[in-house]
Amino acid sequence: MQPLPVAFEIGSTIALLLVLVFDILLVVKRPHVPSMKEASLWVGFYVALALAFAGVLFVIGDATHGSEFIAGWLTEYSLSIDNLFVFVIIMSRFGVPRRYQQEVLMFGILVALALRGVFILLGAQILERWSFVFYLFGAYLVYTAIKQAFGSEDEGEGEDNGFIRMLRRRVRMTDQFDGSRLRTTIDGQRYWTPMLMVFLAIGTTDLLFAFDSIPAIFGITQNAFLVFATNVFALMGLRQLYFLLGGLLDKLEYLKYGIAFILGFIGVKLVLHAMHVNELPFVNGGEPIAWAPDISTVASLVVIVASMGVATVASLIKVRRDRLAAGEDLPHPGAAER
């Protein structure tokens, strides 16, 4: 695979960051709850932007660059949707008013991008020096997939983490929000608002998701620029997607299994890649394992799309069946006569 022109990588990075800045300014200048139409248009715009970028990669780079970006973007996008589930839980638990949720989401997206940027730089350097880390990344993703698929649905959802519980005991805090402010004054006394806890909960959640996200994308491509680009595009429009999906998020019951399958698949792919570049002296005498199958990017793309498609369709079918069982979609008595 030929390297991309340096000027293209630099120019694209600047352009992507400018798009994110524009998105932030929209929240600052026009704080509001977007309508379904507005959210749909923005999500469609960002998806179209990602596909256009993939097309440019096919032209400037080659088919490998383009297919790796699409596979990586879809993987990161699916993981970002999983992240939205947790954002919903956090904002529901803290009772964040809907008109302030845009600011919270933008904060979460910026923190996620910053953490993933750091992890990308560290991961690229580590993988370049120590190829055995592919074994660790692969094993971790398989473990995460099993935990996501078979773990308790309510595990960790009803409780704050230890750091948040400690702050609750030690920080003077009011129960009322004061806009999106972190500090407020009551009777001449300064208090923290619940927004502090919301931001900290979102930030620590982003950190945990970065541990899943970065190994997963390195299972698709080891090109640091493509890794960064897929993460930026996956986070673009995430705020609007939150309002677009709305209450549908908690109805996509089988989505977690699709994401778990993707994580497990990429984990296996990482282990197989580690076998191809094996340097561990106690594995095959420190020599690469030639018989290990090589999973192509195209195969990865098919598995990712199929997994998310099957999980989404199965979830919607279940929603439909549940509504029929509850009598919500049954025709009104006497409708046939009319």
Image (spheres, helix red, strand yellow):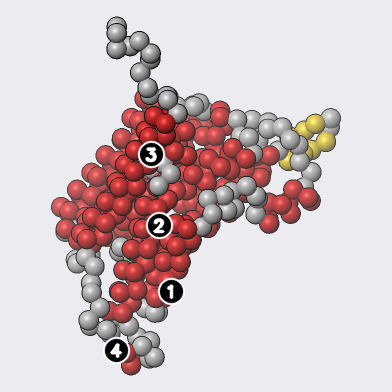
Q: Nearer the viewer's eye, disc 1 or disc 3? A: 3
Q: Residues within 10 Å of mark 4 (few under 14, many from 20)?
A: some
Res 300 → quadrant? bottom left
Q: Nearer the viewer's eye, disc 2 or disc 1? A: 2
Q: Nearer the viewer's eye, disc 2 or disc 3? A: 3
**Amino acid found under the numbered disc labelled 2:** Ala
Indicate which disc residue 260 carries: 2
**Amino acid found under the numbered disc labelled 3:** Lys
Q: Residues within 10 Å of mark 1 (few under 14, many from 20)?
A: some
Q: Earlier in the sequence, mark 2 or mark 4?
A: 2
Residue at image coords 79%, 43%: 172
In the figure, 91 relative to 272: above or below?
above
Instruction: Pick the residue in front: 188 or 158.
Output: 158
What quarter of the picture does the N terminus occupy?
A: bottom left
- Residue with the mark numbered 3: 318
Determine contact: label 2, label 1, CB under 8 Å: no
Q: Position of residue 181 (x, y in %)?
A: 65, 35
Q: Describe the element under mark 4 as helix, strand or loop.
A: loop
Residue at image coords 38%, 34%: 321
**Amino acid found under the numbered disc labelled 4:** Glu
Q: Describe the element under mark 3 as helix, strand or loop.
A: helix
Indicate which disc residue 287 carries: 4
Q: Residues within 10 Å of mark 2 (few under 14, many from 20)?
A: many
Q: CA distance from mark 2 to mark 3?
A: 19 Å
- Residue with the mark numbered 1: 136
Residue at image coords 29%, 12%: 336
Q: Position of residue 131 (x, y in %)?
A: 37, 78
Q: Position of residue 273 (x, y in %)?
A: 30, 74
Q: Earlier in the sequence, mark 2 or mark 1?
A: 1
Residue at image coords 19%, 48%: 55
Instruction: Pick the residue in front: 248 or 77.
Output: 248
Q: Earlier in the sequence, mark 1 or mark 3?
A: 1
